[in-house]
Amino acid sequence: MGHKERVLSALAHRGYDRLPVRYMGEPVVHSRLMEHLGAKDYPALLDRLGDDLRYVQPKYRGPAPRSFPDGSRELVWPDRGWPVPTRYKDVAYSQGVYTEAVYRPFADIADTRELEGIAFPTADWIDYSAVRAECERLQGYAIVTGTPGVLDFVNGISHSRGIERVFMDIALEEPVYLALMEKKFSYHYEMIERTLQAAGGLIDLVQTGEDLGTQLGPLIRPAKFKKLYAAKYRAFMDMVHRHGARVMLHCCGSARSLLPSLIDVGLDVLDVVQTSAANMGIRELHAEFGRDLGFCGTMCVQTTLPKSSPEQIAAEVELRRTLFADGGLILGPSHLIQPDTPVENTLAMYRAAGSLVD
């Protein structure tokens, strides 16, 4: 099977020749793997690991992002892209760097009238002209567009407003938050639809995101999801389906109680699948939702990959091969592979899946 055929066959539960796989890692992890495998660049690394997916994004052509004397900067699509006035800094931690929001332009806004006149990003700031050609260049792979920042009404808006404020907004159904949701939804809906139109049916998956869980349980109740978010998710997923693509939702944490609602609005693939979180065991998820929902990820970057032996990792891969014997899984890490993961452990995952080109 080719890469695209393998992924689409697995998601349709028609079987596969080997588990389809996806790679994600921190930049330092890329570098270590490239050096170990002798891969000259990132695309060559994906080839060596057997990654079956490739991402195609339109290009940003809006106002130039600004940098500021304090070292902060604006980020644009596909890095973050909404809204542009949010500013970020690279924050060092023990093993690398994370890019964090340091200026939140809407943190103190309490009246929707204060949003008037703000130059929110529009789909016209994006250049779609090269999408079709890039899809054709990568036509042997399952092609994905979008990012975890698409839709992303909780985490994404918190970048510009603050996470505590957003949780209060959700609880109180604050008009400012609801107005920001409308603006964010309109932007992502139109931008993704125009990308799919430009691709002419060559895109297979659309990546979205919504971190709905903590380690211990869901962030919001199913009733709140249905009231605030369900209609928007259904409209977005219906649009994607009309263009012949599937929707893949990046969702960290314990989201099991929300999966029936996500299936109801049309979700095709739950992405990352943090199996170390409460009630997210892979056996139970497969038994309860495996016929209605595809999964991508499942190999824990907190426990399994950094702390297990290569033999234990191979056993986890074999468990997934057994559970998903007819498909329903794209194997990969449960988030970006972290710097504390030994190179050999990462290779053990892809070797056990049969994708690694030694």
Image (cartoon, helix red, strand yellow):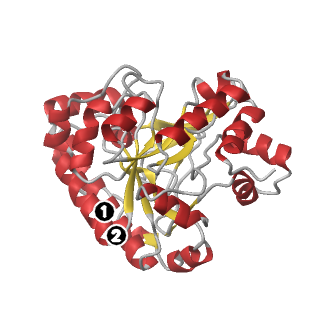
Locate residue 58 relative to residue 106 in the image: left or right: right
Label 1, on which residue?
Answer: 189
For the residues labelled 2 and 1, say whether their Cβ atoms are less than 8 Å apart.
yes
Is residue 115 in sight in this rendering? no
Is residue 130 in sight in this rendering? yes
> Please, is residue 97 above or below residue 248 in the view?
above
* Label 1: few (<14), some (14–19) or many (≥20) C-alpha neighbours in 10 Å: many
How many numbered marks are there?
A: 2
Locate residue 336 relative to residue 176 in the image: left or right: right
Residue drawn where x is 26% and y is 31% of the image: 257
Q: Camera-side residue: 163 or 58? A: 58
> Disc 1 marks which amino acid?
Tyr
Residue 163 x/y as whole percent: 35, 30
Label 2, on which residue?
Answer: 193
* Location of the N terminus (image quadrant): bottom right
> Disc 2 marks which amino acid?
Glu
Locate residue 206 relative to residue 139 in the image: left or right: left
Q: Quadrant of residue 246?
A: bottom left
Residue drawn where x is 34% and y is 72% of the image: 243
Residue 7 x/y as whole percent: 51, 59
* Label 2: few (<14), some (14–19) or many (≥20) C-alpha neighbours in 10 Å: some
